[in-house]
Image: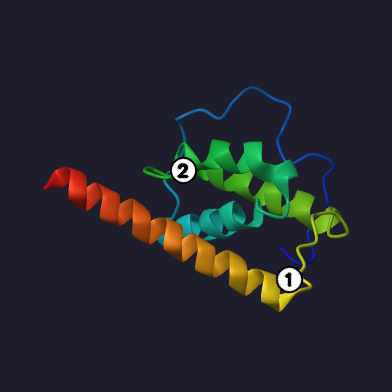
């Protein structure tokens, strides 16, 4: 798909996917690629709806869904410059403080749950 023709939208404007079609040859590859796209939605929220539509058919992947998945890849190919840039925190000391306070809050929540249960 590296040399594919880019498209302007991640979803075809035609009606929704149907349940007809030949099953894909390798469902594992289909699911793996769909999972990678699901992960990509963190930085590319513009593909979230299209990926969600693919996920509706993960239990029985068929050729029309594979075509839709390839369309998402074509869209990504044409919009590589888009997306959210996630940067690490500028202050490590601040991050450590947040981690410690979160751990204390979790410990207190567990202690309260155990006390109520007993």
Q: Which mark is residue 88?
A: 1
Compared to residue 40, the image places residue 57 above or below, namely above
The extreme bottom residue here reads 92
Q: Residue at x 74, y 69 (%)?
A: 89
Q: Residue at x 73, y 51 (%)?
A: 44
Residue 82 in the figure: left or right of residue 59: right
Dot 2 crowding, Cα within 10 Å, few <14, some 14–19, many 20+:
many
Res 95 quadrant in image: bottom right
Compared to residue 7, the image places residue 87 above or below, namely below
Q: Residue 109: x and y, percent?
A: 35, 51
Label 1 near label 2: C-beta < 8 Å?
no
Instruction: Give the structural element (helix, strand or loop) at label 1.
Output: loop
What is the spatial separation of the Cα atoms under label 2 and label 1, in whole angstroms?
A: 40 Å
Residue 15 in the figure: left or right of residue 64: right
Q: Quadrant of the N terminus?
A: bottom right
Q: Residue at x 52, y 69 (%)?
A: 100
Q: Residue 98: x and y, percent?
A: 59, 64
Q: Residue at x 70, y 54 (%)?
A: 73
Instruction: Give the structural element (helix, strand or loop) at label 2.
Output: loop
The extreme left residue here reads 118
Q: Which residue is mark 2?
A: 62
Tally of marks = 2
Nearer the observer: mark 2 or 1; the answer is 1
The extreme top residue here reads 15
Please say whether residue 5 is visible from this viewpoint: no
Compared to residue 39, the image places residue 117 above or below, namely above
Q: Residue 35: x and y, percent?
A: 52, 56
Name the residue nearer the viewer: 110 or 7.
Answer: 110
Q: Which mark is residue 56?
A: none
Please say whether residue 118 is visible from this viewpoint: yes
Q: Residue 27: x and y, percent?
A: 41, 56
Please tell me which of labels 2 and 1 falls first in the chain. 2
């Amino acid at each position: 798909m590296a040399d594919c023709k880019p498209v302007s939208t991640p979803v075809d404007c035609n009606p929704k996917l149907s349940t007809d079609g030949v099953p894909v040859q390798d469902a594992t590859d289909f699911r793996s690629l769909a999972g990678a796209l699901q992960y990509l939605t963190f930085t590319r929220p513009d593909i979230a709806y299209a990926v969600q539509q693919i996920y509706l058919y993960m239990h029985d992947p068929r050729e029309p869904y594979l075509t839709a998945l390839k369309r998402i890849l074509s869209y990504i190919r044409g919009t590589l410059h888009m997306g959210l840039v996630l940067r690490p925190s500028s202050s490590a000391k601040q991050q450590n403080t947040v981690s410690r306070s979160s751990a204390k809050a979790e410990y207190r929540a567990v202690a309260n749950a155990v006390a109520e249960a007993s």
